[in-house]
Image (cartoon, rainbow, N blue to C red):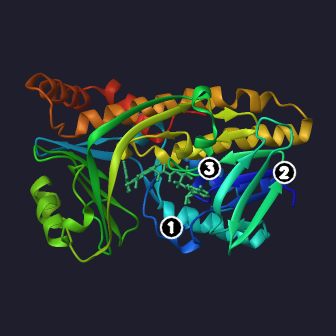
Amino acid sequence: MRTQVVIIGSGPAGLLLGQLLHKSGIDTIILEQKPKDYVLGRIRAGVLEQGTVALIEEAGAGVRMRHEGLVHDGTEIEFGGIRHRIDFKGLTGKSVIIYGQTEVTRDLMDVREACGAPTVYEALDVGIRDIESESPSVRWSADGKKFAIDCDYVVGCDGFHGVSRQTIPANRLRTYERAYPFGWLGILVEKPPVSEELIYVNHERGFALCSMRSRTRSRYYLQCPIEEHAEDWTDGQFWEELTRRLDPQAVSKLQTGPSIEKSLAPLRSFVAEPMRFGRLFLAGDAAHIVPPTGAKGLNLAASDVGILSRALIELYKTNSDAGLDSYSQRALARIWKAERFSWQMTQLLHLVPDASGFDRKLQAAGLEYLFKSTAAQTALAENYVGLPY
Ligand code: RFL
Ligand code: PHB
């Protein structure tokens, strides 16, 4: 078996890359270790930058997103019980679209299936061979049988715990990491959201976020200690704690109900450099992680893929590998800015367990400055809607 590009992982990075390459006549195979329904069952991101939206459209998977996605021109940030609006549209001329990662994944899977491009689900023990040579190959097992495929390039879109980054010798990779001593407990509920826009809440009991997936489906998050487990929280306890952290107007609009999904996500910042080893390229969470506070993870996966797809298309069309050679550097320049923004939003909005009185005063000053300064609001808005590629 032979193909041009082997893509490991069928999350948004792998699926989007597969479609962008397919549109340019480049053959790919996607190897995914989980069953399709498991991939579709993961509830994650909800906020799409315009650059991400444009790439999904370019991939031919934008019809439902345009129809069902909610355009948000701003967001609210609450501190001391008072909400302040950041006007994205007024400050930057741009908006974001609320459309769940699950839906993005489903739409990309549908267009891939429709064009007949191959995806192998439940591909186990994926192994990358001869990646520093001109003829790499990838092996896996499925249904108890072993398979191998030769290729020109391998792209690791297999998330933070995937095999691709681990294939790179430790002395050829530099990693940077920050773990936060808290997580987000998320709940999905079939009830209308409390407000037209998202509300990020800095409360003395901890951070909370009111988000949504549609006009009838809401997504809420609570900051909680990292040691806790989602199963330890009943729906009743979640609603009680959320009610404590929201302002009276939000509480009066809050419609509670049984959770459709409940999960706890740890918060982490991580970057691995460079994002290339021989003919292996890393994209998305395989190379970097941000805490969800800035809504950047999926958007960074998309911008990596935007840069890498153009480089691969250039190579196959013109035989120039200039784009591939500069991929890591170009992607990382954008990634580090998103790392900084996500870290800063996390600092600004969470109750940091070991924060000193000085730290808390600085946090309050940062928020008060934000609410009073158009320059500070513009900086936040410009990062939130997405920096240029
Ligand atoms: P994914 O989505 O993790 O997909 C990787 C895929 O690779 C497969 N895989 C393997 N396949 C074969 N062999 C192996 N050895 C493999 N190992 C793994 C996995 O099964 C999986 O299918 O990575 P990708 O494509 O890079 O996409 C990244 C995004 O999923 C992630 O950054 C976002 O979800 C982060 N994120 C958010 N991002 C945003 O842009 N906006 C948001 O509003 C936002 N909210 C969030 C988030 C992440 C969250 N959690 C759960 C961490 C909210 C939360 C709570
Ligand atoms: C979400 O809706 O899941 C979401 C929205 C905004 C964030 C993070 C997650 O910053």
Q: Which residue is situated farthest in the right direction here? A: 318
- Helix, strand or loop at label 2? It is loop
Q: Residues within 10 Å of mark 2 (few under 14, many from 20)?
A: some
Numbered circle sitting on residue 157: 3
Numbered circle sitting on residue 174: none
Q: Position of residue 62 (x, y in %)?
A: 63, 61
The answer to whether the residues at label 2 and label 3 have Cβ atoms under 8 Å apart is no
Q: Residue at x 12, y 25 (%)?
A: 361
Compared with 352, 201 (above or below) is: below
Question: Hey, which quadrant is residue 332 in on the image?
Answer: top right
Left of 63 or right of it: where is 149?
right
Q: How far is mark 3 from mark 1, CA to CA? A: 27 Å
- Helix, strand or loop at label 3? It is loop
Numbered circle sitting on residue 68: 1
The answer to whether the residues at label 2 and label 1 have Cβ atoms under 8 Å apart is no
Numbered circle sitting on residue 4: 2
Q: How far is mark 2 from mark 1, CA to CA? A: 35 Å
Compared with 352, 15 (above or below) is: below
Q: Position of residue 356 (x, y in %)?
A: 11, 26
What residue type is disc 2 on? Gln
